[in-house]
Amino acid sequence: MNEQIIARHWLTLIAPKAAPALATSTVLILARIWNANGAEHSLGNAVLMTALSLAAGAAGAFASIGYAGDRVIAGTAFAASGALALTGVAGYSDGLSLPLLLWVLATITAYALAARYWRQDRRTAADHARHLGERRQEHAHIERVEALKAGAQIESARAGAAYAEQLATALITRAALPGFNPQALTDAGLPQLLAIDREDA
């Protein structure tokens, strides 16, 4: 019933929210490094990145169609296609205005897609917490009922023990009375009592 309370570090709370911006920023930085190392106005590099981006987009389209479509693979393929397109444009262009514009658009798109999954995660967490609360209440009710049953059984056992003790005391007291004759009770048709040695009493 008692759960361990774990204080999460602030970095673990911020990291999922910063992941889309970090991903697009990393792609932009690597593309600009590639631009400075000879990718600027390189037709071969532009054709290569275009082909890779189109191939990743096609893979995402094929992964998302049909009953056997996998959303995770499709999302990964589309993200790779966008990253390759951003890398190609940022590596090929000579200025920073177009790469920065594409970086802003890619970051906004990434956050828009991630917000959908974050909402779904929050709904799932809320449903799980509500389900756990209902289970805890149900178990607490069952525990209370069982505790009441156990208490009633204990009280019943105590009452039975007290009755047996009082009966034994009454039998001993009656046997110790002067003139008590168990045989006379038996002859009178009463149930036979255990013979008690008067001298031992």
Image (cartoon, rainbow, N blue to C red):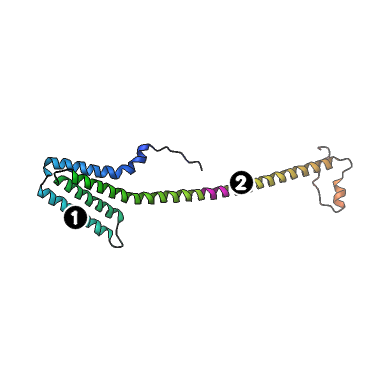
Q: In the shown orientation, is residue 200 left or right of residue 133? A: right
User: Looking at the picture, how far across and down is residue 121, in whole percent?
Assistant: 38, 49
Dot 1: element: helix
* Residue name at image x 22 percent, y 52 percent: 81
Amino acid type, label 2: Ala
Amino acid type, label 1: Leu
> Where are the magenta residues, as a range?
135-142
The numbered disc on residue 89 is none
Structural distance between the alpha carbons of marks 1 and 2: 68 Å
Name the residue tied to disc 1. 54
Q: In the shown orientation, is residue 23 left or right of residue 88? A: right
Q: Residue 12 colored magenta?
A: no
* Residue name at image x 72 percent, y 45 percent: 159
User: Looking at the picture, how far across and down is residue 1, in whole percent?
Assistant: 51, 43
State which tag comes first along the sequence, 1 or 2.
Answer: 1
Between 102 and 132, the one nearer to me in the picture: 102
